[in-house]
Image: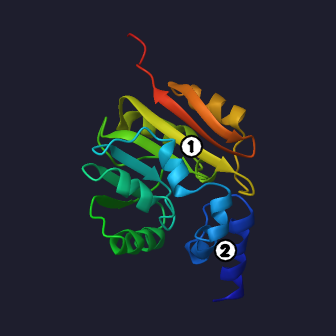
Amino acid sequence: MSPTRLRSILQRTVGQGYFPHQLAFLIDNPIRRLLITPETLADRLPLTPSSRVLEVGPGSGYFSVEIARRVPDGHLELFDLQPEMLEKARQKIEAAGFRNVGYTEGDAGELPFGETEFDVAFLVAVLGEVPDKLGCLRSLYRVLRPAGTLAFHEHHPDPDFSPLQRLRTLVEGERFAFLQSWGWFWNYTATFRKSSPPDP
C-alpha cells in the first residue's frame, strides 16, 4: 500500500468521512462490546419475526447477524457505500447460516428502495459520516412504513459523534417524533417514529 493511500485511510479513521474497509477489524474488536452489544441494540428495536429492517452503514456486519436472527420470517437489507464492507458482512452472515439478508451498495443521501418498504431502519455511528444528512433522513422517511421506527446509536470515540440534542433537532425537523433514548450522553441509542405528513 502506498504512503499516500495509507495516509488517506488514517485520515478517514480519525477525522470526518466514512470508516475505511481496510480497518474493519477495529470495529469487530471484542472490546466494542463494552460500548454496546448486538443483543442490546436488537433489544432496543421493535423487531418481530416478520419485520423488514434496513441497516444503513453496517460496516462488516457487527450488528447484522443478531438482527437477522431476530427476523427469521422477515428481511434485513444492508446498505453501504463500500462494496468491500458488504462482502465482509455477507461472509459473516452466510457463515452464521442466515439467508434472509439483502446487500445493496449506494450513497445514503438517496436510498434506492420503494416507498414504505421497511418497518425499522437503524444507523450505528453513521449519520455523522453522511455528507447529505437531510437527503438521508428524507430518504429514510420515504422508505419507512407509516409509524415505522428509525433508530440511531452514537458513541465516543467516533470522530463523527452526534450529541443527542443535535440529533433530535435534525431528525425531528424531518417529520420524525422522538420516542426514547437509552444510555449515557457519550454512548446512547435513540428511537424515533415516522409521523404522518401534514394535511395538504
Name of the residue lying farthest toward the bottom: 1
Mark 2 Cα shell of 10 Å, populated few (<14), some (14-19), many (≥20): some
- Residue 68: in sight, yes or no? yes
Mark 1, secondary structure of its residue = strand
Between 50 and 167, the one nearer to me in the picture: 50
In the drawing, does residue 58 fall left or right of residue 200? right
| Residue 101, image x, y percentages | 31, 59
State which quarter of the image contains the N terminus. bottom right
Q: Earlier in the sequence, mark 1 or mark 2?
A: 2
Between 173 and 8, the one nearer to me in the picture: 173
| Residue 119, image x, y percentages | 35, 38
Kindly identify which numbered label has been placed on residue 144: none
Is 98 placed above or below 147 here?
below
Between tags 1 and 2, which lies in front? 1
Give the CA separation, mark 1 to mark 2: 25 Å
At 43% from the left edge and 39% from the top edge, which residue is drawn? 139
Q: Which residue is mark 1?
A: 152
Q: What amino acid does circle 2 point to?
A: Ile
At 58% from the left edge and 52% from the top edge, which residue is drawn? 126
- Residue 77: in sight, yes or no? no
Name of the residue lying farthest toward the top: 199
| Residue 21, image x, y percentages | 55, 72
Mark 2, secondary structure of its residue = helix
Q: What amino acid does circle 1 point to?
A: Phe
Mark 1 Cα shell of 10 Å, populated few (<14), some (14-19), many (≥20): many
Between 132 and 34, the one nearer to me in the picture: 34
State which quarter of the image contains the C terminus. top left
Please tell me in which quadrant of the rendered image residue 91 appears: bottom left
Q: Which residue is mark 2?
A: 9
